Amino acid sequence: MPTVSMTVNGKPVSGEVEARTLLVQFLRDQLRLTGTHVGCDTSQCGACVVHVDGESAKSCTMLALQVDGAAITTIEGLANGETLHPMQEAFRNNHGLQCGFCTPGMVMSAIDLVKKNPKASETEIREWLEGNICRCTGYHNIVKSIQEAAGNMGG
Amino acid sequence: MHDFNYQKAGSVADAVSALNAADDGTVMAGGMTLLPTLKQRLAAPSDVIDLAGVSGLSGISVSGGVTIGAMTTHAAVSGSTDVKGTIPALADLAEGIGDPQVRNRGTIGGSVANNDPAADYPAACLALGATIKTDRREIAADDFFNGLFETALAEDEIITSVSFPSAEKAAYMKFPNPASRYALVGVFVAKTAAGVRVAVTGAGDSGVFRASSLEQALSSNFSASALDGITVSADDLMSDIHASAEYRAHLITTMAKRAVTAAG
Ligand SMILES: Cc1cc2nc3c(=O)[nH]c(=O)nc-3n(C[C@H](O)[C@H](O)[C@H](O)COP(=O)(O)OP(=O)(O)OC[C@H]3O[C@@H](n4cnc5c(N)ncnc54)[C@H](O)[C@@H]3O)c2cc1C
Ligand code: FES
Ligand code: FES
């Protein structure tokens, strides 16, 4: 079986995978990083969003072998010890989650947005979340969370 | 998903020989269409040949229009000041594809090669009179799109870039399917040196097509009001759970009017 190597949350990792192994399967099943979720099989829900070399991407729609050599960040890589990332903290403060299933993908996607557009308007935030589906919150508090975090992240 | 051999091509020539050596090989760009297709077992290639490591396939250059490398992502096109300055309608179109994560990985070459009947780029290619460049020849958009998911490409042919000539005026308006964001109907209008061209995606029974009745009406008077009372026949349009052929026909004129207004 082919071997894949990458950096995940700052640590070098490698493993044997099938060619068809998806990045999300490698993260969840082999590395046991189960914060990244799978919510659909049509590449539409965004529960699986991680960062690949700093860009948000759907880990259910990438092969592990495609990201050989890349740097991956998952939801587990955001907090600094007990201190949550400002985006995580803002979701907590603003009740930006209910069941929490969509939350890891929402947070990873939102961080990419704030990095690219620190002063995103409410409309821009809503448009950016096109690829992240939430069945609980109605999005309102998610948008509020992202607005607060953008302020705290220096936006 | 069935398993396959995965290889990274080092060059376009490499990819072509890998395709020829494989039982049933396919190239992969961003995987944004290919991987969902494999996951649903709608295809089961023996070999997947990744173009991501091939240098020279991505990037944007300007000269009398824009040339976009096949591996250029939708995000790179939508964010490009060169594209915005030359053919802003093309940057708008790229910005409207899917969602940010799809735009981060999906490519123009993959979109054009796939020729999904509801994809956006084929409409821009046809309306602007683009040229699709491959490893062996240049193909005019008018000769490239051959029906649902069918193109003029040979089995082992690889798109290297797509060139769009500038237009005097151009705009794209899409009525997105609320779930998938693909076009339920998308209309690209362009006033070009070769006359007015109107291309419609999302609606045709055999994929993207030019709407001659709208082109004629706009040729003498490039304004939304010139389309008052002009209808498109529902005969060769798609009917599915999302929209009837008649509804699509109606949307084509409506989207065309909006596009003409946006083109200014
Ligand atoms: C959730 C979601 C929403 C989407 N919404 C839209 C939308 O609104 N509008 C829209 O237009 N598209 C949409 N797409 C599709 C998206 O634009 C893809 O980027 C595009 O279809 C091609 O994907 P890709 O570049 O990753 O190519 P791949 O998936 O890697 O390849 C697609 C096909 O093209 C072939 N191919 C790729 N590159 C080349 C090349 N250089 N030469 C020859 N053949 C090649 C491959 O062999 C394969 O058959 C959506 C996709 C998803 C998952
Ligand atoms: S699991 Fe739904 S988009 Fe990846
Ligand atoms: S909080 Fe339940 S899906 Fe979003």
Image (tube, rainbow, N blue to C red):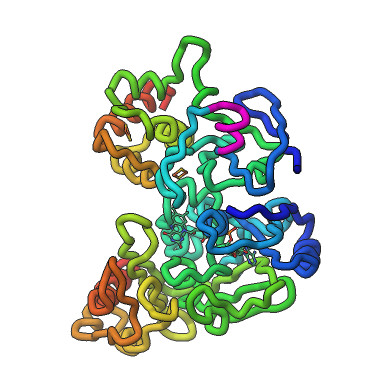
Whole-percent x and y of residue B241? 28, 67
Q: Residue furthest left?
A: B229
Q: In which quadrant is the N terminus of chain A drawn?
A: top right
Q: Is residue A41 above or below residue B182?
A: above
Image coordinates of residue B25 in percent, x first then y, are 70, 64
Nearest the eye: A145 or B25: B25
Q: Is residue B5 left or right of residue A134?
A: right
Please give left or right for residue A36 compared with residue A18 in the image: left
Residue A48 percent across, percent down from the top left: 48, 38
> Magenta span has B27?
no
Q: Quadrant of the C terminus of chain A?
A: top left
Classify residue B59 by image quadrant. bottom right
A34 is higher (above) or lower (below) than B44: above
- Residue at (66, 46) in percent of width and height: A66
- The residue lying toward the viewer, choosing from A124 and B180, is B180
Q: To which quarter of the image does residue A107 belong?
A: top left
Q: State the extent of the magenta-drawn residues as a range.
A: A25-33
| Residue A29 inside the magenta-drawn segment | yes
Q: Nearer the viewer, residue A59 or A108?
A: A59
Residue B115 is situated, as x and y percent measured from the top left of the image, at: 51, 71
* Residue B164 to residue B88: above or below: below
| Ligand number 2: quarter of image | top left
Residue drawn where x is 61% and y is 36% of the image: A26
Residue B212 makes an appearance in the image: yes
Q: Residue at x 37, y 24 (%)?
A: A149
Tell me if I can see residue B61 in this picture.
Answer: no
Question: In which quadrant of the rendered view does residue B220 lie?
Answer: bottom left
